[in-house]
Amino acid sequence: MAANPLDKILKPRFPAVAVGIESDTASVVQLDRTRGTFVIKRAASVNLSPELIRPAFDSPNISDPAELGRALTALLNSAGLLRQRKWSTALPEAAIRSAVITIEGATTSRRETEEVFEWKIERTFGAPMSQLRLSREQLAPDANKQARYLVNAIRLEVLAEYEAVFASLGWHVGLVLPRHAGEEQWLRNGHQGDGLLLTAHDEGFTAVLVRADRILTLRSVFCDEAERDDELHRVLLFYRQRTDAGKQDETTSLNRLLVVGEHLDKARVAEIAEDTFGVRLKPLAAADVGLMIPPGDLGFDTIAAPAGLARLAW
C-alpha cells in the first residue's frame, strides 16, 4: 500500500539519536533497527559536576551553561556524533511536570473546551499557559466518557536555559520531554496486557500504566526515600482499581514491569507488586523490550530514556 503523502506533513520525523540529561549524568544514543529489534549503534555517558544541574520546575536549573556545553561536546566526541545536528532530548523529571487532565462535563464548543483546558492547566501546574511549553496527548476517555489528556509542562524560562546550551552547540532539538516519556516507549510495543513503568529520581518517582500502545494513567510522586515503599503501595493500589475497572478479559491484566533508576530496588518493587496485584513479575531487562546493548559499561537504566526517544524514528 502506498504511503500517505500527508504523513510527511502531519507526522513529524524524529531522529534516531537522542540525548538524556540528569542531575549527575548525560548520555547519548544512536539506534539502528534490524529484524524488529533495536540495536545500539553508538552510545556514551559522561558524569556531570555536582551542582551543575539542579533540576527544578520553578527555579533555574543550570549553574554554568558553558561547562554543560563542554561536557556535552565531550560526550558527543566520545560517541562519534559531533556532526549530528538534529536531536531529541530527555530532561530530568523534576524539570518537567506531567499530569493527566480530565475535562469534566459537556462543553458546547471547541473554544469552551480550550478555556476549560487552560483553566485546568493553571490549576494543575501553578502557572498560566502563557508561561509554559506544553505537549498534549489525548488518552482514552474515563469510565464516565470524559475527555482526558496526558500533558507535559515546562516553564519557558527553564526551557530557555537548556535551549541556549543546545543552540551554542548548533543543535536543532525538535522534541523535549521528561525522562519517563522516553522510558515508557519500551512498554508501547503492542503487547497484550498492561505494562507498568516505575522510574525513580532524587525527589521521588513517576509511575506510568500502559495498555497496549496507549497510556492509561500516570502519577508523579514527590517523597523522601524512607517514604517510597508506602507511596509505591498507594500508587499500585490506585492502579489496581483502574485496571479492575477497565478489565474486559484476561488479556488486560498487568504482565510487564519496568523499573528504572537506582533509587528503587527492583526486587523490593517486585515484592510490592506481587502483594498488590497477586502476580509475580520479573522487572524487564533491555533484551526483554527488544533493545540490544553491546557488552560494556553502559547499563539499560542509563540509556533507557534517550534510547526510547530515538526509537520514535520508526
Image: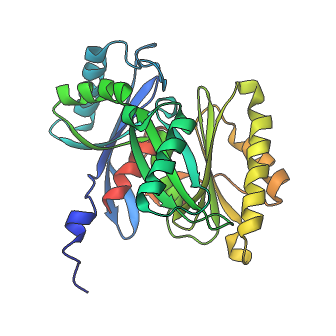
Foreground residue among 191 and 223: 223
Residue 304 can be seen, yes or no? no
Which residue lies at the image location 45% right of the left edge and 18% below the top edge? Answer: 59
What colour scheme was applied to this rendering of the protein? rainbow
Foreground residue among 61 and 57: 57
Which residue lies at the image location 37% right of the left edge and 35% below the top edge? Answer: 130
Please provide percent x and percent y for residue 181.
47, 47
State left or right for residue 200 relative to residue 19: right
State left or right for residue 314 relative to residue 244: left
Please provide percent x and percent y for residue 292.
43, 55
State left or right for residue 278 relative to residue 248: right
Quarter occupied by residue 128: top left
Eyeballing the image, is 302 above or below 74? below
Which residue lies at the image location 71% right of the left edge and 26% below the top edge? Answer: 225
Residue 9 can be seen, yes or no? yes
Please provide percent x and percent y for residue 195.
62, 59
Foreground residue among 188 and 108: 108
Q: Residue furthest front?
A: 108
Quarter occupied by residue 297: top left
Eyeballing the image, is 36 above or below 91? below
Please provide percent x and percent y for residue 314.
32, 63
Eyeballing the image, is 148 above or below 84? below
In what quadrant of the picture does the N terminus appear?
bottom left
Q: Residue furthest bottom?
A: 1
